[in-house]
Amino acid sequence: MPDFALRSLKQVAAGGSAVSAFRSMVSGPEAWARTHPAPRTPAPPPGGTLVDESMASVGAPMPKGKKRGKVTLASSANRPGVGVQPIVTNFLSRLGQPITIGTGTNHSQMTVNGRVSDHWDGHAADIPASGDELTRMGRRALIAAGMPPAQAAKIKGGLFNLQWNGRRVQVIFNTTEGGNHYNHLHVGIR
Ligand SMILES: [Zn+2]
């Protein structure tokens, strides 16, 4: 905003009327504010949706003809103040189906094997599912991480480490490796 007080002092110094200078000092900022509205802050993303266009830039672009699925978060999925990393939600959107993350960072710090879990700092997500639904979702995760679809179609479950877009993607389903994974799909990325 211009310095209206300084401008008024200059008017008086130049031989102008002190009264009109004072009036313009008072009315100036109001008129200026009317023509210079404060910039509007952008609206927050709609509730629950974790993947938007800005996040889509994290990771690889979608292959032609493939659409992202919506990724949402269960209310108790995260520890207060520690969210799931955008790379994780972005990767999950590549499965092309609606995904609800049941557990993000609200997870024990250590894995059953005594290592710090990918969950702890937001690099993993668990998606509740079982049976055929879990198998289908697990295969989609393997394909999203670069496994050829014909190879993924033969897989019934297990623990997999794949390289995707310069990152290590871990996919676990239908196995007791690393804990019981018959009731959820685990996807970890770093
Ligand atoms: Zn997990």
Image: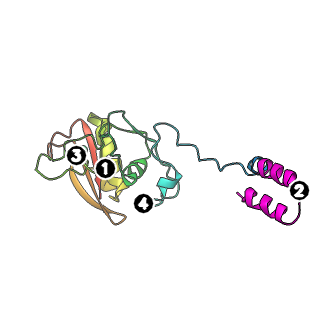
- Of residue 129 and residue 14, the one placed in the foreground of this image is 14
**Disc nearest the viewer among 3 and 4:** 4
- State the extent of the magenta-drawn residues as a range: 1-28
Amino acid bearing label 2: Ser
Q: Earlier in the sequence, mark 3 or mark 2?
A: 2
Q: As shown in the figure, which amino acid type bears the numbered disc 1?
A: Gly
Q: Examine the image and state in which quarter residue 167 appears.
A: bottom left
Can residue 156 be seen in the rendering of this structure?
no
Q: Residues within 10 Å of mark 1 (few under 14, many from 20)?
A: many
Instruction: Give the numbered dot on residue 122.
Output: 1
Earlier in the chain: of badge 4 and badge 1, it is 4
Q: CA distance from mark 1 to mark 2?
A: 66 Å
Q: Residue at x 30, y 43 (%)?
A: 104
Q: Which callout, 2 or 4, points to the residue nearer the camera?
A: 2
Label 4 beta carbon less than 8 Å to ligand 1 = no
- How many angstroms separate mark 4 from mark 1 (CA)? 16 Å
Is-magenta flag for residue 19?
A: yes
Which quadrant is home to the C terminus? bottom left
> Are the residues flagged by discs 1 and 3 in contact, CB closer than 8 Å?
no
| CA distance for labels 2 and 4 | 65 Å
Q: Are marks 3 and 2 in contact (CB under 8 Å)?
A: no
Q: Residue furthest right?
A: 16
Q: Which residue is mark 3?
A: 157
Q: Amino acid at mark 4?
A: Gly
Front residue (pair 158, 100) = 100
Q: Is mark 3 within 8 Å of ligand 1?
A: no
- Quadrant housing the N terminus: bottom right
Label 4 belongs to which residue?
Answer: 59
Distance from disc 3 to disc 4, alpha carbons, whole Å, reads: 25 Å
| Side of 35 relative to 39 (left or right) | right
